[in-house]
Image (spheres, rainbow, N blue to C red):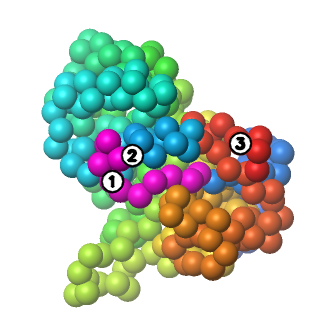
Amino acid sequence: MAWNSSMVLDALRSSDLLEIGILANQIRLNLHPENVVTYELHGMATSLEEASRGAVSRGSSVNLSQIRDAEHIPLDTLRTSLLARHTQQGQVTFHHLPISRLQAVGGIALVETFRRLHEAGLRSLSANFYPTETASASTTQLAAVLRAAAECDLLVSISITIGNSESLEQRVQTLATLRALQDESNAIQAVLVRVYHAATPKARREEEATAVDYLKALAATRLFLDNIEHLQTDWSVMGPKVLELALRFGADDAGAVPWSQAGSPEPSHHGGESELRRIIRDAGFRPVERDALFRQSLLR
């Protein structure tokens, strides 16, 4: 059964949490019948030089969204820095370049920019969606970016942040937009559902998403976006109990654990690989480490 906007909106409005979870879980099992839940290990926010050295020593890659001041480095300068490290430091690769860096690039120049970045070791992009801010202009730009990314073999990860006073209709519109973009480009590899948390203590916290809101949004995302392979949950916000439920509400990936906490035997609301693997097993799945392109490790 193909889900449309009206059906997803009805599911979000429904008080039957169990039903939407069962339906989403079935789609997840159709896409990932191997009974595995993946997760990624990554470095903490650091400089490009430090991150590249760490990636070489661990045989991993560099997450550009965590590089200090990466947003302020001119794109040509960034590409030169990536190329130097890609060619000189064991072919290290780079991931999750924020799409916001490409706002000034348009048309044919996008393809050429992506080709040059791919030669420098870039393998994926990232974008953030806020349902209250989705606009036709930004969607048009994103569509162009996704088409160019697909042409240059770059994959895209999208994060959706809920709980910032948006309506259910706005959440559904965001999902409908992403489904249409994926139908056109097939460039989106994964969607991560996040929860908004206000930065100031004076914020109206009663409007923030609850655990039930989050699970419904996660399930609705899996139901509507069955054309996107991976659905990620962010356990660092909602905690281990919600993570265990989320893995039965459509999510096949448990997000990322910082390298500094990898292998830690101590339970942690915000990380700890041992705790994460235990939760995945308790949910009835096999935990498997992956890389930034969702390639599974054969050693763990």
Residue 240: image quadrant is bottom right
In primary-sequence order, the first of circles 1 and 3 is: 1
Residue under pointer 1: 46
Query: What residue appears at the point 32 percent right and 16 percent down from the top-left corner?
Result: 116
Q: Is residue 143 above or below residue 210?
A: above
Return the residue nearer the eye: 84 or 177.
84
In the rendered structure, find residue 10 and report the number of the disc placed on it.
Answer: none
Measured Cα–Cα span from mark 1 to mark 3:
25 Å
Q: Residue 245, located in which quarter of the rendered image?
A: bottom right
Classify residue 33 as left or right of residue 39: right
Q: Report whether 147 appears left or right of 81.
A: right
The numbered mark, 1 or 2, whose residue comes first in the sequence reads 1
Q: Is residue 276 magenta?
A: no
Q: Say which residue label 2 marks.
A: 51
Q: Position of residue 198 (x, y in %)?
A: 30, 75
Query: Which stretch is magenta?
Result: 40-50
Residue at (40, 21) in percent of width and height: 87
Tag 2, which secondary structure?
helix
Give the label, 2 or 3, closer to the camera: 2
Q: Residue at x 82, y 51 (%)?
A: 35
Q: Which residue is mark 3?
A: 297
Question: Height in image: 267 above or below 124?
Answer: below
Q: Amino acid at mark 3?
A: Ser
Above or below, comparing residue 95 to residue 208 in the picture: above
